């Protein structure tokens, strides 16, 4: 995958990319305690999933026409390393398959050279207005 090219406070990657990355400095708001998914002050698995989805959203953005968005429909995550508050992590997502409106990704979350989490994610491209109107 490409080197980190997007942080939450910078511009997204150039057009026609197949991958994207986001950077996060883990704060108290990102911990298992804050997300009520555990009782230890380390990066929460739900926050890992959100980072992976954020990177995937950026990676697929160039494939969307006006009026379209993508929504997450599946995530498989392996969270393999605890990450303390104050540590920087980078989530990277890369498009590995496109089948019609379905876009599949592989993602990783790293802390320096160490893998924090990895997995797969699937999104589907939808018409924003029709999606919001669905009951």
Image (tube, rainbow, N blue to C red):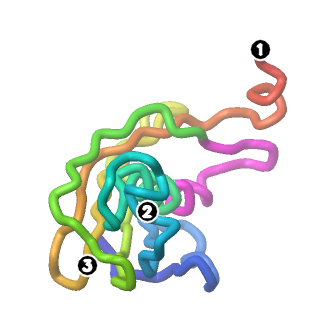
Separation of residues labelled 2 and 1 (CA atoms): 32 Å
Q: Name the residue under label 1.
A: 135
Instruction: Residue at 77% x, 37% y: name it.
Output: 128
The correct choice, above or below, for 86 with respect to 76 in the image is below
Separation of residues labelled 1 and 3 (CA atoms): 41 Å
Q: Mark 3 points at which residue?
A: 111
Q: Mark 2 points at which residue?
A: 18
> Residue 99: which quarter of the image?
top left
Q: Left or right: 2 with respect to 6?
A: left
Instruction: Residue at 47% x, 72% y: name it.
Output: 28
Residues packed near mark 1 inside 10 Å, few (<14), some (14 to 19) or many (20 plus) = few
Separation of residues labelled 2 and 3 (CA atoms): 22 Å
| Contact (Cβ within 8 Å) of mark 2 with mark 3 | no
SS class of the residue under badge 3?
strand
Q: In which quarter of the image is the C terminus?
A: top right
The correct choice, above or below, for 118 with respect to 131 in the image is below
- Where does residue 7 sit, x and y in percent of width and height? 53, 80
């Amino acid at each position: 995958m490409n080197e980190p090219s997007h942080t939450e406070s910078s511009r997204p990657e150039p057009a026609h990319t197949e991958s994207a990355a986001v950077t996060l400095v883990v704060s108290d708001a990102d911990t298992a305690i804050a997300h009520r998914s555990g009782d230890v002050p380390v990066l929460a698995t739900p926050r890992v999933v959100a980072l992976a989805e954020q990177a995937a959203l950026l990676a697929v953005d160039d494939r969307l026409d006006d009026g379209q968005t993508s929504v997450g429909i599946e995530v498989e995550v392996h969270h393999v390393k605890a990450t303390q508050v104050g540590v920087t992590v980078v989530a990277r997502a890369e498009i590995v398959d496109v089948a019609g409106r379905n876009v599949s990704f592989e993602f990783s979350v790293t802390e320096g050279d160490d893998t924090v989490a990895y997995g797969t994610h699937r999104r589907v491209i939808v018409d924003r207005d029709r999606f919001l109107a669905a009951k």
